[in-house]
Image: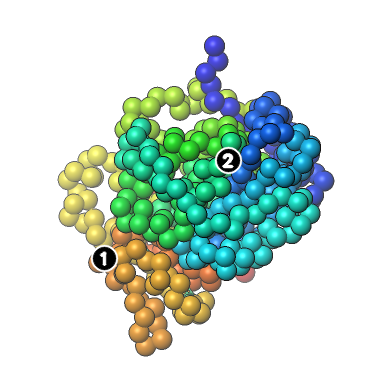
Amino acid sequence: MNNKTRVSVVKCKSYNKISLKEAVSRCVSLLGGFEKFLNSKSKIVIKPNLLLAAAPEKAVTTHPLFIEAVIENIIDITGSSKNIIIADSFGPAVPYNRAGMEKVYSTAGILDIVKRTGCRLNYSTEYECLSNKGGRILKKIEVIKPIVEADVIINLPKFKTHNLTVITGAIKNMFGIVPGFTKVGYHLRFDDFEKFSEMLLDIVFSVKPALNIMDGILGIEGDGPGRSGTPREVGLILASDDPISMDIVMSKIMNIDQRLNPFLEVLKKWNIKSYTDNNIEILGERLSDIIIYDFKLPKSIGQKRLTRSNFLNTYILPFIRSSLNPYMYIDYNKCSLCKTCQDICPQNSISYSNNRIKFNHRTCIRCFCCSEMCPEGAIGIKYSFLGNLIFKRLGMAGKLSKKRKAQDAR
Ligand code: SF4
Ligand code: SF4
């Protein structure tokens, strides 16, 4: 018996409506087609990435035409949109109430999809607390109501980097089933990137989407997943019934050293052995043809590379660890003083005085929520002089391609 998980990958260069619908259909057909995952009686929830109120061209959110192409493919099978609802709980900067929902839905182009397809849109703020007895570190999960009520969850992540978890794809997108500001509490409880990655895996093992279809047409590289990252044309759609395998393939396309994929590290620690290369079958495109060798990784990658070394961890890092921590900084030319960062910081490490936002680097837990949520992309990440020196000397700070340097300089 073949126990392999499968990830299909097809090329799709643009959000052209007709070719997009066909490309989504082709990608899912490689897994057996939409009919394998749902039928006309299924209650279907579409779970896009609606991190914050950002226009589609910023690449922060799942593109509305991509969501529409998926819904049209589903209607071809079910004959109707009446059992389809779009739902997400946004990043903590957006209040999880009617006003917050309206703002995100209109800015991200979701209202237009609803008009054209007739599907429903979630305006309920209700959630349920689900028991998760099998969870390794998360024994209860607060989950928004539409997810609890659905028979079929279709997860529509974006192809993006993430300062905390290196990548954000199908696994991290499921963090959006946790309601609004409750996410900040999870950041506090799981306050380093390893614990946080464990919590995310507990969520996807407990609430597993039936199908994941990734919008990798326009992705984000660099300091993602919010406005501090840089949109990058990737030109791919990925599909899988397994969110973990999908993210492993995405990270390979990003040319990330697999030892730096925090989810693989957690699976190793949990002694789950089913996610080796031999157990993941890639359908459609050949991996070697689609790796993006100059994909720009988040600045925090340098520190993650260093902490993989047992010798350094045991003998050297305890003495110099604090100088190697990245720290947050503000580009005051971009900052609009909206104070969103101050409102959502789980540690209260951000203050406001003399018309300036300031960080308390001693109490900051490097969750990167402020950078993720800043609507102006004004919060970046830097290393101290010593950190910079070490990471540069060790070649760990990430290399920017000449082409990207030229683009960024423009
Ligand atoms: S840094 Fe960003 S989130 Fe914070 S006040 Fe300035 S614009 Fe708002
Ligand atoms: S300052 Fe930013 S990175 Fe630090 S704890 Fe607050 S939100 Fe997280």
Element at label 1? loop
Residue 133 picture quarter: top left
Q: Residues within 10 Å of mark 2 (few under 14, many from 20)?
A: some
State left or right for residue 380 relative to residue 160: left
Residue 407 picture quarter: bottom right
Element at label 2? loop
**Which quadrant would the C terminus be assigned to in this image?**
bottom right
Decide if residue 188 is in sight here. Answer: yes
Where residue 216 sits in the image (x, y, percent)?
63, 46
**Can you name the residue that lies furthest to the bottom here?**
354
State left or right for residue 68 relative to residue 373: right
Where residue 70 sits in the image (x, y, percent)?
71, 43
Residue at the spot 31% in from the left edge and 69% down from the top edge: 349
What residue type is disc 2 on? Ala
Between 262 and 255, the residue placed more toward the observer is 262
Q: Which residue is label 2 attached to?
A: 150
**Which quadrant would the N terminus be assigned to in this image?**
top right
Label 2 within 8 A of ligand 2 by Cβ: no
Q: Which mark is residue 363?
A: 1
Q: Is residue 361 above or below residue 156?
A: below
Q: Which mark is residue 299?
A: none
State left or right for residue 296 relative to residue 360: right
Residue at the spot 57% in from the left edge and 69% down from the top edge: 99
Q: Is residue 91 above or below residue 275?
A: below
Between 260 and 81, the residue placed more toward the observer is 81
Residue at the spot 63% in from the left edge and 50% down from the top edge: 86
Label 1 within 8 A of ligand 2 by Cβ: yes
